[in-house]
Image: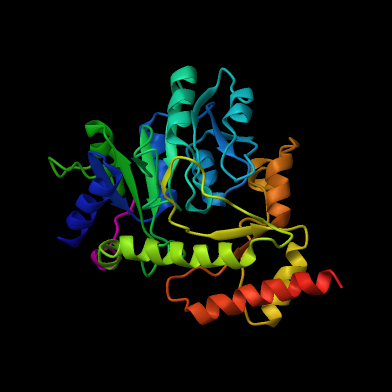
Amino acid sequence: KETSELENLLKEVSRRKHAITVNSCTDALYFSLRAAGIGVHDEVIVPALSFIATASPVVRAGAKPVFADVLPDGNIDLNEARKKITSRTKGIIPVHLYGRMSNPDEITRFVNDTGLIVIEDAAQALGSSCNGIPAGKTGFCSCFSFDPSKIIGAFGTGGAVLTDDDIVAEKIRSWRAQGKDTTTGTFSEPGYNSRLSTLQAALVLMQMKEMKHIIAERNRIASEYNRHLNGLPLNILQTPAGTDCWNYHKYPLFTPLRNELKKFLAEKEIETQIHYPYLLSGQPVFGSPQDVFPVAANISQQTLSLPVYPELSSGEIGYVCNSVQEFFKKQSI
């Protein structure tokens, strides 16, 4: 019951025909690639800056991830992606980094021009929308994550595939349940143990019903940060034109003094995170290609995420802001 109710709610928020819950977003991406027929000898373009799970399912599917640089906001640069297209390129996986959406209209135009299959990595963007299009709506398949680090999280892991294709949906429902045919009950091909448990589904469902409030609280915190940190010698991401909602999965700021600021805040007992301290292109599992990705590298060297969970009080937000201000004041002495 809870799983079906959750899937129905996910269909509603993403405006998709089908939602199939699975064990993780990593599995969701892999199943999407497999359903698209992507495999050995194929190439898939992915951003050079993202979590490892954006690219590892490409390898798991037997294909090769080809990396493209990103825009200053961390989302994939489609002009750079276009330069990576070869006769073997079959797909592209755009990521909505920090929950801040890549422009879906631009992605659609890119697909229409190139004919590539889009698998939308919306792991960080549940609840975000741009130009009236919600995260999870774009492409052949879209994938959500319910990792505990996300704005809606399970106790362990969880994910979902969104699609409008009836055949794809049936395939993924079978694969998540050991390859069991949902009509006959027989097993006609190898599958996986990738179902989202009822307990996890119930927890995610409970939070989904409060998602608007959760996002509103994260936006409240981000607004306070914007107001108090404006004017300091650091860069803050602005809300892009056309954005209906940014869920503020992360609140990143950018400074060449990132490591020093992180250490200073840690001494103040303020936990911060780096998203991400590495480029995907530099990981040995992908053969460490020697291409240069200057924008992605710059972000990786400068980004620092401040706390943005909804339970932060105004006093705690003020303490974080005062500490950041104190750090930069000391730098100018």
| Extreme residue in the right direction | 333
| Residue 240 visible in image | yes
The percent coordinates of residue 242 (x first, y second) are 44, 40
The picture places residue 253, in percent across and down from the top left corner, at 64, 59
Residue sitting at 23 percent across and 56 percent down?
6
Looking at the rendering, the stretch of residues picked out in magenta corresponds to 191-202
Point out residue 194 in the picture as x, y percentages from the top left corner: 33, 53
Q: How many marks?
A: 0
Identity of the residue drawn at 61% across and 57% down: 275
Colouring mode (rainbow / by chain / secondary structure / one colour) = rainbow
Left or right: 18 as drawn, with respect to 109 = left
Residue at (50, 43) in percent of width and height: 95
Q: Position of residue 189 (x, y in %)?
A: 29, 38
User: For this rendering, which residue is in front, 121 or 104?
Assistant: 104
The answer to which quarter of the image holds residue 159 is bottom left
**Where the N terminus falls, by quadrant?**
bottom left
Position of the C terminus, as image quadrant, is bottom right
Residue 191 shows in the view? no
The verdict on residue 216 being magenta is no
Relative to 322, say whether 257 is above or below: above
**In which quarter of the view is residue 38 placed?**
top left
* Residue 120 as seen in the image, left or right of residue 73: left
Please name whichever residue, 91 or 131, is drawn nearer the observer in this view of the structure.
Answer: 131
Q: Residue at x 56, y 50 (%)?
A: 238
